[in-house]
Amino acid sequence: MASFVAEVLASSGKLEKEDLSGKVSKMSRKVEDTKEEVCEMINKRYSDFLPTLQGSEDLMVQVETVSKEMDALKTCIETEVRPNIHMAVAEYTKLKQQLEKNTVIITMLGHLKEFHSAMEEFNKALQEKKYVDAANQLERARDNVDSLKSWKISQLPLLSAINSELTVQRENLIYHLGDEWKRLVIWTLPSSKGKTSSENLLKMCQMLIHNACNGDGELKPSALLCCILQALAIQGELQHKIKLFSQVLLKNMLKPLVMYASLSVRVTEQQDEGTILALQCLEESHEERSAPSQVYSKLLLVLKTLHSHLLDPERSSGPDVSIGDKKLSAILGELIWEELSRCIIHECLVHSIPTNSSQLEKYNTVIKETEDFEKSLKEMEYLHGDSTDLLKYARDVNCHFASKKCKDVIVAARKLMTSKMHNTVKITPESKLRLPKLPAPSSEVKVKQDIVKEEAMMENSKQLSAWSLRLPACRISESVQQLMELALNTLCEAVGSSTQCALQLFFTVRNIFQLFYDVVPTYHKENLLKFPHLAAIQHNNCMYLAHHLLTLGHHFRSHLPNPLSDGVATFVDMVPGFRKLGAQCFLTQLNVQRAELLERLSTAHNFCNLDDEDNYIAASKAVRQVIHQLKQLGTVWQDVLPVGIYCKAMGNLLNTAITEVIAKIMMLEDISSEDGEHLHTLCQTIIEEGPLVFIPLAEEHKNRKYQEEVPLYVKKWSTFKELVIVLRANLQEIVDRWADSKGPLAVEFSSSEVKSLIRALFQNTERRAVALTKIK
């Protein structure tokens, strides 16, 4: 019986496995026994030296027997056991793969069943207008389709079909949701072709939020609207829908309420329709810009209405509408706030910034209104966070006031600089700047001033004349006087302002003068070259500004905050530049006039051969033109230039003319008696009429003094008069006026020049030779 069982088990391979194990165990024991016997024999042989030949042979036989059994066992394992192992592993792998395939098929069938069930539930919920359930079932179907896609069987035709069905049903749901949204939230908008104006917006822009019951057993509109929004959120379309809504809301309602002061919003509740938000025009309002408080109240009315009828889940029986952790009001707030706050800043707050520092304290009301506005928005969860750009802008009123003031000042200054220069006002030494009355300086500054006063009193008891630092009488442009008043008013604004504001205003005043330095010479360049009158006015303008810049900073320094009060508030460094600018402008005009004088004298044919009638007429005409030009300049500059500058300028030009005449006459080698007479006549004309060009004052009797002082302003006047005397004098008179190099003639001319004149005027005679020898 045991052998039969063994055969059966052997045929199944199980016995072989058990025999193999037993054989291996038995073989291990034999090996161990043999090892012990061999070791014992070796020990006896080499350690105890016992004769064990027979035992050794027996052991050798035993070792060989064990080796053969080991080889047989190894051969059995190689030929029988190992192939059976490979076959078992392959069969196991095949069975495993089959099981996995069956599992996949069962799972796919489960997903298909779930998809079908979800689509059935979806269609049922959609018909019953249970949009949230429909959206959830559609998401459930989508999850099953995504699971099917993950099994890498996308080539399966059925998968393509159900994927298409899922897409179609999703678009169907979104269409129904959009249709319901349009029915519950109705916009009436102006035509895109029409002009954007308050009247156009008034006629057409309104929004109806339908929240009245139809009485057909349907959901309340508020609950239905909440379900629609929640379904859109589940499908990932709510962000897009709210974004479109926010764009329409901003463009057609919120921004117009900020931009147009004549617009307001009206909220009406109609029993059969719902809540209506509509724009209306205020006929009584004629203001161009709304006050911040008005803007905030209009915006809050719209946003509160939206919050209570559209965005607040507590008023409806529907679920809480959100995307992730964000509520619907927070999403709408994020979409509209940046653009809305920018619009409020640029269209409202910018225009509410005070133009005068005395109004800054009143602006705290606007800051409080802005804080309350943002607080209300945070309560409705439109806003999150502590401070926004809108509130920061309102709180930085000092900076914005300074920036606005500086911008307005620069614009006004540039307008004055580019205005006409010839409108002038009279400045006298008694004229003073109308400096404002400033508050008393701080105690530290007072102490410093008292110390300086004491030191000044101790230094010298003699004081300068009251006329020392007075500007001489002249005329300046009315625009420059206004420019100085503008600078004074701006510095007054800086007094009592914050440090940053004061610094900004002070350096704006410096920029005004720097702008004058750069703009006026460039903008009026052609006129300054063309018209002597304007060149003189520009000279006076520059000197006027330089004069007042000397003390302007000193007057305000002690009333300004640090670091301005420590010496930064000064304009003294600009004074040399303005003086140079005025001097260069007037000198350029003088050079132009000098060139014209020389050009006129060039037509006199060098004053030679005046016995020829044509030459004499040309020379006489040239002299008359020179006198006429000088008289014209004298008239143009009369009562414009300071007397001292006027006399120096006219003297310089007259000196240029007579210097040229002297040079031309001195170049003549032969002067006949008739030529000498003509030359004398022409020169006498200059001597008689030259002083008459000195008319600096409008009162003629006051000008006589300056006409008598011609030699002080015309360097070559005495030389010219001596030349005129020589032209009609005889040899003895010339020698007498030379008086051995001590006479008046010797003061004005050198001996070689006098000899040249004698040779030209007189023929070569013994008397001329004697006279020449006396000229040394």
Image (cartoon, rainbow, N blue to C red):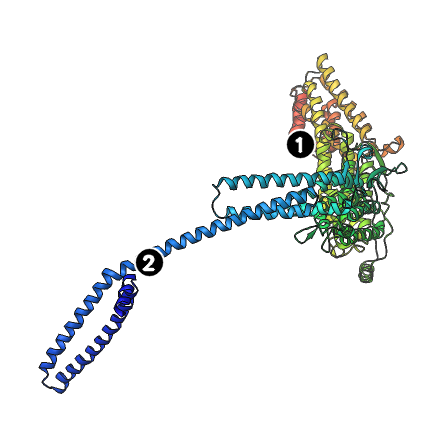
Question: Which of the 4 quarters of the picture holds residue 700?
Answer: top right
**Which of 599 and 714 lies nearest the eye of the viewer?**
599
Location of mark 1 (residue):
750
Q: Quadrant of the C terminus?
A: top right
Which residue is situated farthest in the top direction here?
613
Residue 98: x, y in percent?
41, 52
**Which of 575 and 591 lies nearest the eye of the viewer?**
575
Give the amino acid type for the residue marked by disc 2 in the picture.
Ala
Residue 167: x, y in percent?
59, 40
Query: CA separation, marks 1 and 2?
Result: 143 Å
Q: Is residue 520 visible?
A: yes
Which residue is situated farthest in the front direction here?
1
Give the amino acid type for the residue marked by disc 1 in the picture.
Ser
Q: Name the side, left or right, on which 34 lies relative to 510.
A: left
Query: What is the secondary structure assignment of the residue under circle 2?
Result: helix
Q: Name the side, left or right, on which 373 lies relative to 55.
A: right
**Which of 443 and 447 lies nearest the eye of the viewer?**
443
Instruction: Work out whether mark 1 precedes mark 2 in sequence or the reverse, and give the earlier one.
Output: 2
Question: Which of the 4 quarters of the picture holds residue 336?
Answer: top right
Q: Name the side, left or right, on which 383 lies relative to 473.
A: left
Q: Are marks 1 and 2 in contact (CB under 8 Å)?
A: no
Residue 332: x, y in percent?
72, 47
Residue 236: x, y in percent?
64, 46
**Which of 105 and 401 lies nearest the eye of the viewer?**
105
Location of mark 2 (residue):
88
